Image (tube, rainbow, N blue to C red):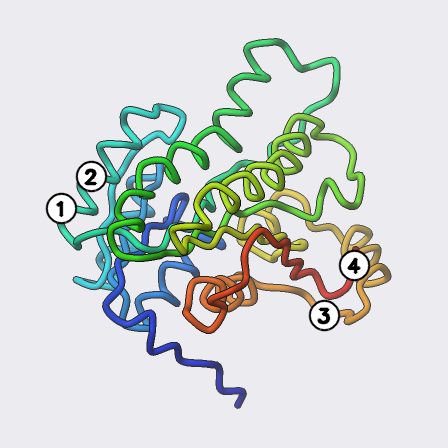
Amino acid sequence: MTEFATYPSLKGRTVLVTGGASGIGASIVEHFAQQGAKVGFIDLDADAGAELQQRLGEAVRFEAADLRDIAALGRAIASVRAAFGPITVLVNNAARDDRHSIDQVTPEFWDERMATNLKHQFFAAQAVKDDMIAAGGGAIVNMSSVSFLLAQGGMPVYLTAKAAIVGLTRALARDLGPHKIRVNALFPGWIMTERQIKLWLTPEAEAEMMKGQCIPEKLFPPDIARMTLWLAADDSRLVTAQNFVVDGGWT
């Protein structure tokens, strides 16, 4: 059986994960908890969040909030801080890749999708940066996607948001770097979450993915969680403003 890394620098740290109740986010929460971190996670899905909280116990704290509501996001972050102490690792994971056509996009739809997939990443970083500055450093991981690298069709606003995360990452890395706060972007490939399998994985789509990847194996949430751990740990202490792709070599 493969054994994976343990990161002593993560033990006891307070970590915040957005969109942490299911899929990739839930795996990230679980992996940080296994490292001995104190993990707060925010999600709109109260049932899934409560279930994960119950399963993982006192090492984690769930806050139900709609991340499109920046005031609610701020209150949730404050609750995590009050429970676990200053936040020195932020994983901006929350997103939704709902399919849509160009003609479906209205100004209201555009704004809502940007609020869902991009806006909260900036405001979460803004809310925790002073904790990290006071602690003498920290790490922020912004979740992007290979979808825009592949020029994937059928969801233009989502791809726009995921591309913009690269610019946000580099801007934050420059401004926060003097405080020893590292900011990197993580690009998952097609990760086999329950949602992806249920909604979009067909034999034809799977065959196309396997043809495109250099290593023709399915990727799962722990593959992303383990890269997130490394980016958060002191092992990557001078790694910042970078893009990390985990997709089996598809892009």
As drawn, the residue found furthest toward the left would be: 82
Disc marking residue 250: 4
Give the amino acid type for the residue marked by disc 3 in the picture.
Answer: Glu
- Residue beneath disc 1: 82
CB of mark 3 within 8 Å of CB of mark 1?
Answer: no
Give the amino acid type for the residue marked by disc 4 in the picture.
Answer: Trp
Q: Position of residue 18 (x, y in %)?
A: 39, 44
Foreground pick, 1 / 229: 229
Q: Position of residue 202 (x, y in %)?
A: 74, 50
Residue 132 vertical placement versus 33 (above, below) = above
Residue occupying image coordinates x 46% and y 81%: 5
Give the amino acid type for the residue marked by disc 1 in the picture.
Answer: Ala
Residue occupying image coordinates x 47% and y 28%: 119
- Residue beneath disc 3: 217
Disc marking residue 78: 2
Numbered disc in front, either 4 or 2:
2
Q: CA distance from mark 4 to mark 1?
A: 42 Å
Mark positioned earlier in the residue sequence (4 or 2): 2
Numbered disc in front, either 4 or 1:
1
Mark positioned earlier in the residue sequence (3 or 1): 1
Mark positioned earlier in the residue sequence (2 or 3): 2
Mark positioned earlier in the residue sequence (3 or 4): 3
Numbered disc in front, either 3 or 4:
4
Element type at mark 3: loop
Disc marking residue 161: none
Residue 130 appears left or right of 111: left
Numbered disc in front, either 2 or 3:
2
CB of mark 2 within 8 Å of CB of mark 1?
Answer: yes
Residue occupying image coordinates x 52% and y 32%: 118
